[in-house]
Amino acid sequence: MLLAPLLAAMFLAQSPLRRLAPQTALLTYHDMIATRGPKALWFDCTTQEFIGQLDWFAKLHVHFITLDQLYVHLTTGAKLPSRPLAITFADNYQGFWDRAYPVLKARRIPCAMFVHTGYVGDRAHGRPKMSWEELRTLDREGLVTVASQTVSHPADLRLLSDAELRHEMVDSKATLERKLGHPVQYIAYPNGKFDTRCEAAAHGAGYIMAFCEETHPAEDSSSLFAVDRYVHTKFRRAMSDIHATR
């Protein structure tokens, strides 16, 4: 039986997002590829494109923040550095380890990686995924916040039963915590698809913040369990929306 809409509404009413002036942008990247060939997808980013975007952010004097900093800001109103930007990555692609992480590490830029735990180390389905050893290294070195993107990356969480939804959220969290040895507090909805039932399920699974792909500054999000992010191709719009270019 699906969670009653009234219960979801009650949950949201109990977890309002602190209303703050729009100032923080979040970007979500996917795979990092060497060159843009005929097999490239629209959401791919080449190494050179990524470096160019980071250079542009540097000229704007952007300050990169962690998800922990964002959470404290949204829940307490704590002040962030000027022109704050959080970078996230989806899908645990090997391209992150091979191409993006060396660039981020050299510049000491923090980011988050959302992982669908059922495909860690997978080389048979789609593009190669990072291994648990690589994820543990990222986690141990401290620059990357490793977080959940469910177990199997369902195309649309809204279509799952309550039991299936709980499995995707609870089991992915448990696996990450067992493999990494510490609590995992954040989750991103696959393909950015969610509803209030998904938000309530994320809260019930023990996460403290969840992310979608609505294109607004973080402070304009509807709740802590629907924090907005821009797909990376809209990085200029994201900066414009938070007045970072002024």
Image (tube, grey):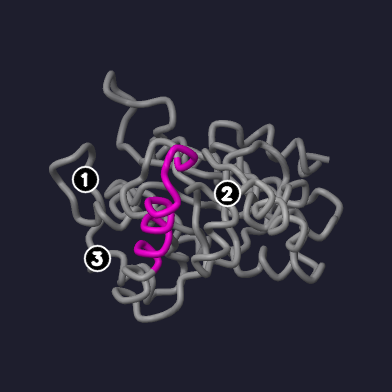
When asked about the image quadrant of residue 36, the answer is: top left
Question: What residue is drawn where x is 35% and y is 68%?
Answer: 176
Q: Is residue 188 visible?
A: yes
Query: Could you tell which of marks 3 and 2 lies nearer the N-terminus?
Result: 3
Say which amino acid is labelled 1: Pro
Residue beneath disc 2 = 197
Q: Residue at x 50, y 51 (%)?
A: 188
Name the kind of residue labelled 3 in the image: Trp
- 33 displayed left or right of 165: left
Q: Position of residue 210 (x, y in %)?
A: 57, 56
Q: Are marks 1 and 2 in contact (CB under 8 Å)?
A: no
By secondary structure, the bulk of the magenta-drawn segment is best described as helix
Residue at 31% in and 55% down: 97
Residue at the disc numbered 1: 128
Please report the bounds of the magenta region as a residue range.
157-173
Q: Which residue is mark 3?
A: 132
Q: Nearer the viewer, residue 95 or 28?
A: 28
The CA distance from mark 3 to mark 2 is 30 Å
Which one is in front in this view, the residue at disc 1 or the one at disc 2? 2
Q: Which percent across, then down, holds residue 7?
A: 66, 55
Quadrant location of the C terminus in the rendered image: top right
Could you say which is closer to the camera, residue 42 or residue 170? 170
- Residue 56 magenta-highlighted: no
Q: Hey, which residue is sitting farthest front in the picture?
A: 1
Q: CA distance from mark 1 to mark 3?
A: 13 Å
